[in-house]
Image (spheres, helix red, strand yellow):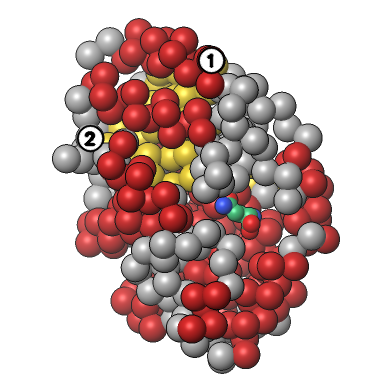
Amino acid sequence: MDYQSILAEIEQEVFPLLERGKVANYIPALAEVNPKQFAMTITLFDGTQYSVGQADALFSIQSISKVFTFTLALKFYGTELYKRVGHEPSGNPFNSLVQLEYEKGKPRNPFINAGAINVTDALISHYGSAQVAYKEVLEFIRAISDEKSITSNDVVSASEMEHGFRNLALANLMKSFNNLDNRVADVVGTYFKHCAVEMNTKTLSRAMLYLANDGVDPISGQIYITASQSKRINAVMLTCGHYDASGDFAFNVGLPGKSGVGGGIVAVIPEKMGICVWSPGLNENGNSLVGTKALELFTTKTGLSIF
Ligand code: GLN
């Protein structure tokens, strides 16, 4: 298949839509990003990459980091993890408080904010401190993307902490239900730091390969998680990766995927490739507007989807 030509067609077709999305403005440091940017990369199992647009430009991975923290927590806790966080779609916005109160402090899944904060708490308990947990999450991201220079942007995480009222409320609510072990400020601070990691579409599409290959990196041969755990992470990406628009994403794109408010979306084509698309303008559900469209075009043009 001529992937390069397909990506070039997609880039042209989405161009008129670049004006439509709105950048996340509830994190002031992200509000300054120019929305009219676009990049897309696919990485095959032999490491071959095809890209269009600004594929070297770094952006804030935000909620895409939840895939990596969920992976590590599942690796260490196994199915015990589901005692503190579920695996059902929430049907609610990513930062909603209402359901968490009804359901006595147990978040629906690891990809809504409450669930990801809970997973970060589990990692802090596992590693013994917030500092070590953050360092190990970063090392894991560097390993799976084979890029040692990846780091987190302190301006973005500090900006989010300053305006993090909702995430702090979610963490406090979980703490009140005894579903958070560590100090709220430490947990939320660590969560913001892994959200503020900066990557590009090349490194992020590379980082998805272990999930396309049953938990094993097809290039290095490194085993990160079991095939069963990889299957579960993909299932949760498919059903919960786009919050209350997860059904739409499954319907229109047909791949396990995870979005972030920095405008990135990662997706997995089992046995074939990792994909990342980036465009900072978001739709009303907080998912990249052009990114979603580009992925829909990709699965339509290539005929590759899980269905
Ligand atoms: N750091 C962001 C937040 O907690 C992540 C949200 C997202 O990317 N959807 O609000």
Is any atom of residue 18 visible in this view? Answer: yes
Residue 151 horizontal/vertical position (percent): 67, 44
Residue at 33%, 50% in the rendered image: 247
76 and 302: which is toward the camera: 302
The residue tagged 2 is 305
Instruction: Give the mark nearest the N terminus, 2 or 1.
Output: 1
Work out how far the residue at label 2 is from the one at label 1, CA to CA, in angstroms.
25 Å
Quadrant showing the N terminus: top left
The amino acid pointed to by label 1 is Pro
Residue 271 lies left or right of residue 250; in this view the side is left
Q: Is 163 above or below relative to 76?
A: above
Q: Is 65 above or below relative to 253?
A: below
The amino acid pointed to by label 2 is Ser
Label 2 residue SS: loop
Residue at 24%, 21% in the rendered image: 302
Residue at 54%, 39% in the rendered image: 283
User: Residue 74's quadrant in the figure?
Assistant: bottom left
Label 1 environment density (alpha carbons within 10 Å; few <14, some 14–19, many ≥20): few
Is any atom of residue 233 visible in this view? Answer: no
The residue tagged 1 is 16
Residue 2 horizontal/vertical position (percent): 28, 10
Quadrant showing the C terminus: top left
Q: Is 267 above or below relative to 192?
A: above
Query: Is the residue at mark 2 in contact range of ligand 1, meaning its CB lies under 8 Å from it?
Result: no
Residue at 22%, 35% in the rendered image: 305
**Count of numbered labels shown in the rendering:** 2
Where is ligand 1, by quadrant? bottom right
Q: Residue furthest left?
A: 307
Residue 173 horizontal/vertical position (percent): 62, 82
Label 1 residue SS: helix
Residue 249 horizontal/vertical position (percent): 36, 43
Camera-side mark, 2 or 1: 1
